[in-house]
């Protein structure tokens, strides 16, 4: 039997309603903050990610699904959404739109990862990007919105961790200090870290190798090297979060695994599961890096698969339930079947969820199926019922039976009572 590729999942009909619930609820919040949906291609030119995400990141060096297409072009399945959204922003001249541009997306992403709990090769993200604001106020609006989204799902034990990783000016000084620290043990680091030392020493801090992680302990942190502007920006973000009573922890260890970040970075971490559910930050240089005007921006992406995993584990709300039929109609005989067809069509056109037998089952099997579908009401039509234009409608939960005229309005009145 052919099986699905490692690190992918099937979202089955008995589970997909949970995904729809999370997506609809998140979408409502995003839209109330003025975000509009954007959809970009699943695959892009590889160069977009090499330049956007950074060619010394784990994502680009180790995790991309890259291939040559039949025209010998190097193509990559998107490992994340921001680079594609920014490319679309530039390519479609969106800087001429009223600024800032606020966009959201729900898209599958592809990373060749070591598959483990919460870490998949195909996973879905719900992301939000604000392009065109340098103000700390954009950081605050975005973090507050992310907090509202996380809280909407009543998930226990999620903390907001924030940090600032400064601008290229602060980074130059910081990188010198970091190189001094790492340089003492460079020979002991893994080969990838060694290649990153000159070009991008900060990436050594997110190496997943055990020995490198140990060597990194006690490394200088960038927050101690912020320039005045970055420091004031970060102070303003923190002050506003305090005012809004959004709890957070300052974690100087957050460096984020993608190169485009500047200034504020943040992660909503599930303490119970030990992974990050939503993460993002400012990326003031990316639009320019990809060929646009200097345009400051900030965004985040929520790992939908991770959120759903936790949601399934802890959420007790009965707001989320699989939709069940309002009415199951069964018929005996040809004339009754005709009546059934007409009634089912008319009721469905009125927005009522109707199930009927489409397998030519016996009445007994049909009623058993009605039970399995968890239909609220049952209506059985035979020749007598057609002749009198009246039938019994049964409440499947209470067993109560009621005479009802076989007219659409009467049936709707009865089942919506
Ligand atoms: P990221 O931290 O790489 O950031 O991913 C964001 C979130 O996606 C993670 O916190 C996690 O919940 C989820 N995620 C990442 N990798 C996997 C995986 N292999 N399996 C399951 N879930 C995963 C970004 O992607 C940035 N583009 C976010 C951003 C948007 N920054 C600014 N704007």
Image (cartoon, grey):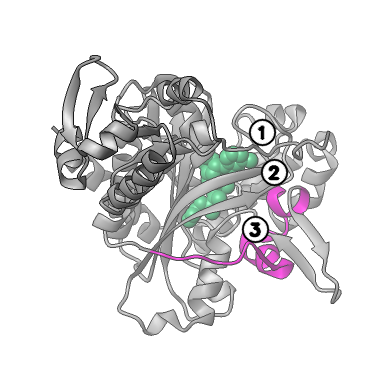
**Residue 78, which numbered label?**
3
Can the viewer see residue 233 in this picture? yes
Q: Mark 1: few, some, or many residues within 10 Å (few <14, many ≥20)?
A: some
> Closer to the camera, 20 or 384?
384
x, y percent for residue 382: 34, 32
Residue under label 2: 204
Residue 196 vertical position relative to residue 353 in the rendered view, above or below = below
Q: Position of residue 340 (x, y in %)?
A: 36, 42
- The residue singled out by tag 1 in the image is 216
Residue 34 in the image: state x and y as whole percent: 27, 62
Q: CA distance from mark 3 to mark 1?
A: 30 Å
Secondary structure of the residue carrying tag 1 is: helix
Residue appearing at x 52%, y 69% in the figure: 86
Give the image quarter of residue 60: bottom right
Q: Magenta residues?
A: 37-62
Q: Residue at x 63, y 61 (%)?
A: 42
Q: CA distance from mark 2 to mark 1?
A: 8 Å
Which residue is found at the position 32% from the left and 44% from the top?
25
């Amino acid at each position: 039997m052919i099986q699905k590729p490692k690190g992918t999942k099937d979202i089955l009909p008995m589970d997909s309603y949970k995904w729809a619930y999370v997506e609809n609820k998140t979408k409502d919040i995003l839209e109330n903050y003025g975000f509009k949906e954007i959809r970009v291609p699943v695959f892009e030119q590889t160069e977009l990610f090499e330049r956007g995400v950074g060619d010394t990141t784990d994502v680009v060096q180790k995790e991309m699904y890259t291939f040559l297409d039949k025209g010998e072009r190097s193509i990559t399945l998107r490992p994340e959404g921001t680079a594609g959204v920014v490319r679309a922003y530039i390519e479609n001249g969106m800087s001429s739109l009223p600024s800032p541009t606020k966009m959201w997306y729900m898209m599958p992403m592809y990373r060749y990862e070591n598959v483990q709990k919460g870490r998949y090769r195909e996973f879905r993200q719900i992301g939000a990007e604000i392009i065109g604001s340098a103000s700390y106020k954009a950081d605050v609006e975005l973090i507050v919105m992310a907090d509202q989204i996380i809280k909407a799902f009543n998930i226990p034990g999620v903390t907001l961790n924030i940090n600032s990783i400064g601008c290229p000016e602060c980074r130059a000084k910081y990188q010198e200090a970091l190189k001094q620290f790492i340089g003492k043990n460079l020979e002991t680091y893994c080969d990838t870290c060694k290649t990153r030392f000159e070009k991008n020493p900060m990436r050594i801090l997110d190496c997943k190798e055990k020995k490198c992680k140990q060597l990194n302990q006690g490394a200088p942190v960038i927050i101690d090297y912020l320039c005045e502007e970055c420091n004031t920006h970060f102070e303003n973000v923190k002050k506003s979060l305090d005012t809004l009573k959004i709890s957070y922890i300052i974690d100087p260890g957050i460096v984020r695994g993608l190169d485009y970040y500047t200034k504020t970075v943040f992660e909503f971490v599930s303490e119970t599961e030990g992974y990050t559910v939503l993460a993002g930050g400012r990326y003031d240089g990316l639009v320019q890096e990809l060929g646009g005007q200097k345009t400051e921006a900030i965004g985040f992406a929520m790992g939908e698969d991770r959120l759903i995993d936790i949601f399934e584990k802890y959420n007790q709300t009965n707001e989320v339930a699989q939709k069940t039929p309002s009415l199951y109609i069964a018929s005996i005989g040809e004339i009754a079947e005709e009546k059934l067809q007409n009634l089912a069509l008319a009721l469905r056109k009125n927005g009522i969820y109707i199930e009927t037998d489409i397998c030519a089952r016996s009445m007994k099997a049909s009623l058993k199926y009605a039970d399995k579908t968890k239909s609220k009401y049952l209506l059985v039509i035979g020749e007598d019922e057609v002749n009198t234009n009246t039938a019994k409608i049964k409440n499947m939960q209470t067993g109560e039976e009621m005479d009802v005229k076989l007219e659409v309005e009467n049936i709707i009145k009865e089942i919506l009572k």
